[in-house]
Amino acid sequence: MDRSMFISRLRDSLSSLTYKEIEEIVADYEEHFRAGLEKGKTEAEIAVSLGSPEDIARQYLGEKAGKSVPAKPDNTRMWVAGAILIAANVIVFFTPLLTLFWIWFALWAVSFAAVAVGFVIAVAGLVNVTIPVLNFLLAPFLTLFGTGTVFLGIGMIIVLGWVTKFAVKIIKWWVNFNIDIARKAGGVNA
């Protein structure tokens, strides 16, 4: 067995540990190979002297848990837990989330419509009306009302942008939370 195969099998056997822990262990064994090669040994000789990557992994996993731990995660349990979580999320959360999505979508539409309509009203207030009395009374009102509507629409767009960023963070957290539950059900500590 050469160095790359040894390291690959070791990584696979340690897959239930965190990425950082795996990298620390692999770095130690990379160093064993480097030192052995400097002494004139072949990669195969070094691999034999180190032992089975699976046995090495069991030793690390047993030390971490304080007992003997299976080296491979239970993918079946992980997939079953994932399917149950997906079904629960669809049944429990789909309708409220769909409703909130349409409310969110409608608010964005109203925000952009307020900016557009407010702009049109403000411009209409600036255009001269042929009846002098209406021009005196109506023009300032239309200009102020249109300008206020534009600012209201812009304010809604800014607030909806913040709400959208917050909602995306919550959705990412929820997805990662569900993935963690499925992994733990399969015995993967990530």
Image (cartoon, rainbow, N blue to C red):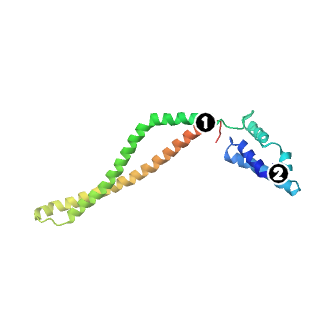
Which quarter of the image is occupied by the C terminus?
top right
| Local crowd size for mark 2, using a 10 Å CA cut-off: few (<14), some (14–19), many (≥20) | some
Q: Judge from the rendering whether residue 189 lies leftward or rightward of residue 127; answer left or right.
A: right
Residue 69 picture location, percent across and down? 72, 34
Q: Judge from the rendering whether residue 98 lies leftward or rightward of residue 146; answer left or right.
A: right
Which residue appears at 83% of the width and 52% of the height?
43
Residue 96 picture location, percent across and down? 41, 38
Residue 100 picture location, percent across and down? 39, 42
Name the residue at the front extreme: 1
Which residue appears at 79% of the width and 49% of the height?
29
- Residue type, numbered disc 1: Met
- Calculate the distance from the C-alpha at mark 1 to the C-alpha at mark 2: 35 Å
Circle 2 residue:
32
Query: Residue 185: in sight, yes or no?
Result: no
Circle on res. 78: 1
In this rendering, is residue 168 above or below 84? below
Residue 54 appears in which quarter of the rendering? top right
Q: Choose between 56 and 170: the one closer to the eye.
A: 56
Helix, strand or loop under label 2: helix
Circle on res. 103: none
Residue 82 appears in which quarter of the rendering? top right
Name the residue at the right extreme: 40
In this rendering, is residue 164 above or below 76? below
Query: Residue 11: in sight, yes or no?
Result: yes
Q: Choose between 149 and 116: the one closer to the eye.
A: 116
- Residue type, numbered disc 2: His
